[in-house]
Image (tube, rainbow, N blue to C red):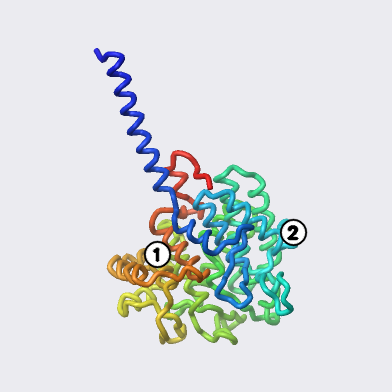
Amino acid sequence: MVGHAQRLSLWMIAAFLLGISQAHAAANCDWPQWTAFKTQLISADGRVIDASTPQQHTVSEGQAYALFFALVANDRPAFEKLLQWTENNLAQGDLTAYLPAWQWGHRDDGSWGVIDKNPASDADVWIAYALGEAGRLWNERRYTVLSNIIANRILREETADIPSLGLTLLPGSVGFTQGKNRWRLNPSYAPIQALRRLAANDPDSSWSAVVASSQKLITDSAPKGFSPDWVLFQTGKGFLPDVETQADGSYNSIRVYLWAGLMDRNDPARAEIMNALRPMAAYVAAHGVVPEHVDTRNGVMKGDGPSGFVAAMIPFIDAAGDAQTAQKLRQQLSDHPVPTNIYYGQALALFAQGGTDGSYRFNRDGSLVPRWTQSCVSPQKR
């Protein structure tokens, strides 16, 4: 028989080993890239600052992305600060009544405040998504209710019923319906996984129709396999080059490949989207670089994309099954990391890195699975 002293010794050893295991699990759930992003780019009161612009501006998209990252990192204090700043400064103090303005910063007259009050639907979608998932994962009904309110407002104010497309997400409330028969659209504003989750959260709403039109927008606006930043849709003619940007694919469209690469393998839209965009994967594999600009009408490339583009392309190349090219891109990124003061590049890198290192993933229904819900012993406190 085991004596009392031996039992105590065995218990102490087991407890010690369990403590090591728990500490290791907690350490695995730390996300140093988020800590760096928060330290370098977010003010103490919750404003994501793009220091690379003269206005030192903040865009609603940046606030939305940071909310998502804070949730992935299980950082509720940061999440709440970001939400409060967004509501107080971009939504006239009430996100239940107003969609957030797109741009806030240093005005020409020297004052600080809203520069462009038109909302941006990509930010609104990610804010609604982050709030909905925060409500579920943190069991906070206030977030869930606010998510539903914002999602319904998006449907009312930022969509149009477009012939042969159906109910379609517009880039914003004002300025994107050009006459009775033409609309200006942006494929990168339609992350399928986020839209799919909004549809799952409210199955009686019209979000399922938006998911369907978004899939068609992504695939049909890229007939040569390269997604444009902006595109026109005209009744009877289909997709046409945008008047302002022509057929250029660059700083907006890089997100189309990123969102595609982050989709769950069982998402019903994934195979069609990946197949439609496969020429971009082939180009990157053949040339070893991510282009900064592509003429989506003919595939003519111009310039090498910045480090943020390289980061954003890695999940897409992984999803395409090209491990060798993905590794080359990882080495490029290691040799030339995204500058710490470049907000957009850092945001792209955080989405990409978190999605490939297991910090988070999306389920088939678009629901978020952060690593801390799977392997952490207790929530992180920051």
Residue 285 percent coordinates (x, y): 31, 75
Q: Which mark is residue 315?
A: 1
Horizontal and vertical percent position of residue 279: 38, 77
Query: Which quadrant of the view contains residue 321?
Result: bottom left
Q: Residue at x 60, y 62 (%)?
A: 63
Asked if residue 160 shows in the view, the reply is no
Q: Residues within 10 Å of mark 1 (few under 14, many from 20)?
A: many
Q: Please report contact status of discs 1 and 2: CB closer than 8 Å, yes or no.
A: no
The image shows residue 66, relative to residue 170, as above or below, that is above
Give residue 93's mark: 2
Q: Is residue 176 left or right of residue 73?
A: right
Q: Measured along the vertical axis of the image, is residue 361 above or below residue 229?
A: above
User: Toward which corner of the image does residue 316 lie, by quadrant?
Assistant: bottom left
Query: Which numbered disc, 1 or 2, marks the residue that appears first in the sequence?
Result: 2
Quarter of the image with the N terminus is top left
Callout count: 2
| Residue 368 image point, x, y percent | 50, 52
Looking at the rendered structure, the kind of residue marked 1 is Pro
